[in-house]
């Protein structure tokens, strides 16, 4: 049986994940550099990312080897632990860049919003897999009401990007399950009608970001600076790019947040359109492998887990790329495996391990 489980692992997903991570480390090495008279100085972000990656491997192994069916039992405890951690951020959280989102653990700054994505994913899979059939109003409101609590707490930190990510993961899983026709008709009318009301719930800096997205030239040195510099970096890469360590926007410190939210802009400047398309192809192959696992899973819970992981990565990739290219507002969502971040790296590897877990146990169940 162990041999059969090993053969059932989605090895292409393992390989693509490794390639993406090491491309990210290579890109961070360049993004960490800045030009001075004596040459190129490099900050240690890429070294830290390597350490996070090494720590992510045992996390991936645990999520891969422990039977994922145990997560169904752990879903509620994990959810409430996440809520407690998110609430504690308001009282003992560490403030960085004007936002209180982190807990200081001494050896690292832990971001509970990353755990919120996992807990909502797992609990959502449990609630959605209880039965089959499309969701009507009552079960839909039950799932939304329960799982939206972490998203609300994250948005209050304030961290609109991560809060939106939690809701998008859940929304993707709900659409994967399916909605009745009357719920769909109501949503098509109600969502666009209620969306403008969200403007009044935004903080002033969030409103400025949206305004600068629509007209970045209105504040080129303020709210529109990120968008303009990112577009300059991407455009200056042209077809073939400026070559590794050849980017000027990043090395001369014009490009902000170049090791986190705008890591893709560094990559696009140095590797150009051709390199960017190759990276996009890798991400598409990565998502395709996860979708295959969700489709081939033999039990509902495993299928919804894999689908949740798919939407976790899909939305982050789509929003970050749209943000860097200037077609979406800046909301602070990193690009998986390319952006620097300890908590995010551990979560990324853990979720890949979860998908591998589902893939290697697909032969244990009868088709449902």
Image: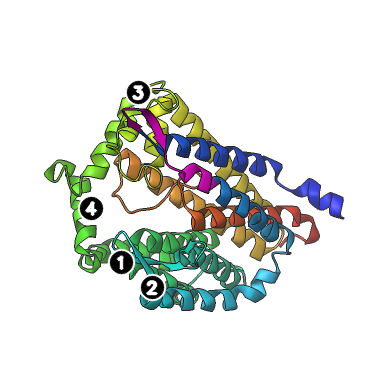
Q: In the rendered structure, are the residues bearing label 1 and label 4 in contact, judged by CB atoms less than 8 Å apart? A: no
Q: Nearer the viewer, residue 295 or 253?
A: 253
> For the residues marked 2 and 3, what is the alpha-carbon distance in whole angstroms?
42 Å
Asked if residue 21 lies left or right of residue 360, the reply is left
Q: In this view, does 186 lie above or below 342?
A: below
The reply to whether the magenta stretch includes residue 40 is yes
Regarding residue 142, the answer to whether it shows in the image is no
> For the residues marked 4 and 2, what is the alpha-carbon distance in whole angstroms?
21 Å
> For the residues marked 1 and 4, what is the alpha-carbon distance in whole angstroms?
25 Å
Residue depicted at x 16% and y 42%? 220
First-in-chain label (1 vs 3): 1
Determine which of the numbered discs, if any, sits on residue 209 in the image. Answer: 4
Q: Where in the figure is residue 85, as x and y percent of width and height?
A: 47, 75
First-in-chain label (4 vs 3): 4
First-in-chain label (4 vs 2): 2
> For the residues marked 4 and 3, what is the alpha-carbon distance in whole angstroms?
27 Å
Asked if residue 118 lies left or right of residue 328, the reply is right
Determine which of the numbered discs, if any, sits on residue 190 in the image. Answer: 1
């Amino acid at each position: 049986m162990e041999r059969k489980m090993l053969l059932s692992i989605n090895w292409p997903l393992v390989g693509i994940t490794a390639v993406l991570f090491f491309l990210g480390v290579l890109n961070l090495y360049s993004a960490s550099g800045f030009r001075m008279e004596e040459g190129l100085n490099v900050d240690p972000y890429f070294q830290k990312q390597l350490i996070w990656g090494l720590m992510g491997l045992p996390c991936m192994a645990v999520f891969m080897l422990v039977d994922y069916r145990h997560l169904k039992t752990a879903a509620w405890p994990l959810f409430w632990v996440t809520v407690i951690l998110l609430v504690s951020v308001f009282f003992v959280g560490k403030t960085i860049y004007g936002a209180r989102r982190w807990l200081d653990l001494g050896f690292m700054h832990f971001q509970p919003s990353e755990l919120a994505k996992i807990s909502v994913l797992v609990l959502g899979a449990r609630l959605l897999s209880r039965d089959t059939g499309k969701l009507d109003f009552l079960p839909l409101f039950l799932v939304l009401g329960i799982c939206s609590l972490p998203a609300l707490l994250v948005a209050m930190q304030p961290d609109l990007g991560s809060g939106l990510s939690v809701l998008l993961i859940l929304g993707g899983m709900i659409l994967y399950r399916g909605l009745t026709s009357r719920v769909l008709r109501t949503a098509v009318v109600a969502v666009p009608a209620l969306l403008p009301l969200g403007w009044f719930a935004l903080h002033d800096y969030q409103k400025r970001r949206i305004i600068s997205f629509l007209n970045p030239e209105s504040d080129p040195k303020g709210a529109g600076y990120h968008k303009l510099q990112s577009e300059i970096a991407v455009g200056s890469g042209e077809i073939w790019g400026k070559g590794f360590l050849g980017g000027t926007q990043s090395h001369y410190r014009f490009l902000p947040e170049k090791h986190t939210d705008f890591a893709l802009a560094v990559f696009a400047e140095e590797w150009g359109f051709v390199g960017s398309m190759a990276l996009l192809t890798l991400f598409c192959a990565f998502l395709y492998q996860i979708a295959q696992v969700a489709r081939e899973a033999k039990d509902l819970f495993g299928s919804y887990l894999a689908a949740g992981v798919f939407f976790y990565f899909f939305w982050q990739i789509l929003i970050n790329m749209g943000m860097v290219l200037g077609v979406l507002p800046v909301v602070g969502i990193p690009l998986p495996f390319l952006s620097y971040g300890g908590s995010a790296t551990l979560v990324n590897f853990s979720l890949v391990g979860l998908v591998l877990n589902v893939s290697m146990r697909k032969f244990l169940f009868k088709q449902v």
